[in-house]
Image (cartoon, helix red, strand yellow):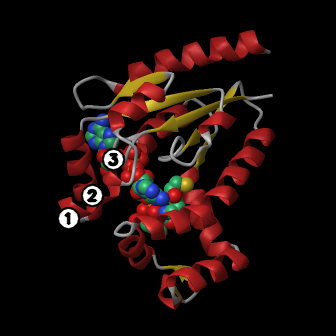
Amino acid sequence: MVLKIGLTGGIGSGKSTVAKVFGTLGIPVFDADSVAKNIMNEDQHLQQQIQQTFGDGAYSDGTLNRKYLADLVFNDPFKLEQLNALVHPATIQAAEEWMKKQDAPYAIKEAALLFEAGSAGHLDYVIGVYAPQALRIKRVMDREQVGRQDVLTRMSRQIDEQIKMRLCDFIIINDEQQMVIPQVLKLHEKLLDIAGKEK
Ligand SMILES: CC(C)(COP(=O)(O)OP(=O)(O)OC[C@H]1O[C@@H](n2cnc3c(N)ncnc32)[C@H](O)[C@@H]1O)[C@@H](O)C(=O)NCCC(=O)NCCS
Ligand SMILES: Nc1ncnc2c1ncn2[C@@H]1O[C@H](COP(=O)(O)OP(=O)(O)OP(=O)(O)O)[C@@H](O)[C@H]1O
């Protein structure tokens, strides 16, 4: 069976950027944020549940209204829990099924909320991507044209970054001081080695 690796980090840490580097090395990557959105757009039953819980405005013309939903859930912890309870089980199951189909020494599940959603237990090792908070805020503000307060609110719904990193087996520092590609290459060699020994 494929060695299952998690890749996590708080908002703006650079998970997707790091995941792309692993992708260029031929490692399959499951992008949980995107899959969660696909499921929310395509699963009719889930769509109904989301509309019943958050109102018809959650979808426009059958497509998830991300801004509407983000404004609701990130400003109300109870609503966020309701959304997580609807979306996370299906996303975790999709990742499990995807992992079973992978034919590579190891495969990566990239997800912001591995620990928060309780899915880290399904994985063999977890890589954390670390960047200082000020840089993470700046990156997200530049990428999405959102305000600082919106980023801080979203951050406050995730576990503290220092604690998250302590829960990880490996850390990649993405602080724009240390080079990322050599760190990924080194870890790639290590994971190939572990995968070889576990066969
Ligand atoms: C509310 C939604 C529609 C907003 O969409 P939007 O395009 O603005 O954000 P996107 O999904 O790309 O997430 C960007 C970042 O926000 C943070 N974030 C997203 N969902 C959550 C959450 N449930 N709790 C805490 N932080 C979150 C993560 O750092 C994530 O990487 C969307 O985030 C969502 O459906 N979230 C619930 C499902 C979920 O938990 N997805 C993420 C991992 S499976
Ligand atoms: N080392 C880097 N140098 C310059 N820009 C970077 C670096 N790493 C990430 N970025 C930029 O910062 C932004 C956030 O990175 P990325 O989307 O990879 O983070 P993420 O952790 O996946 O974020 P989110 O949790 O919000 O989805 C992107 O615009 C990306 O291009």
**Assess mark 3: CB under 8 A from ligand 2?**
yes
Q: Earlier in the sequence, mark 3 or mark 2?
A: 3
Q: Position of residue 179 (x, y in %)?
A: 31, 24
Residue sitting nearer the eye, 196 or 77: 77
- Label 1 crowd (10 A; few <14 / some 14-19 / many >=20): few
Residue 191 in picture, x, y percent from top left = 60, 18
Residue, x 41% and y 64% (percent of image)? 77
Q: Position of residue 194 (x, y in %)?
A: 66, 13
- Name the residue tied to disc 1: 147
Q: Which residue is mark 2?
A: 151
Residue positioned 77% across, 33% down in the render: 103
- The answer to whether residue 170 is visible is yes
Amino acid type shown at disc 2: Val
Compared to 136, does 122 lie above or below?
above
Q: Quadrant of the C terminus?
A: top right
**Is there a contact, CB below 8 Å, between mark 3 and mark 2?**
yes
- Earlier in the chain: of badge 3 and badge 1, it is 3
Question: Where does the N terminus fall, quadrant-wise?
Answer: top right
| Residue highlighted by disc 3 | 12
Check disc 3 and report its element: helix, strand or loop. loop
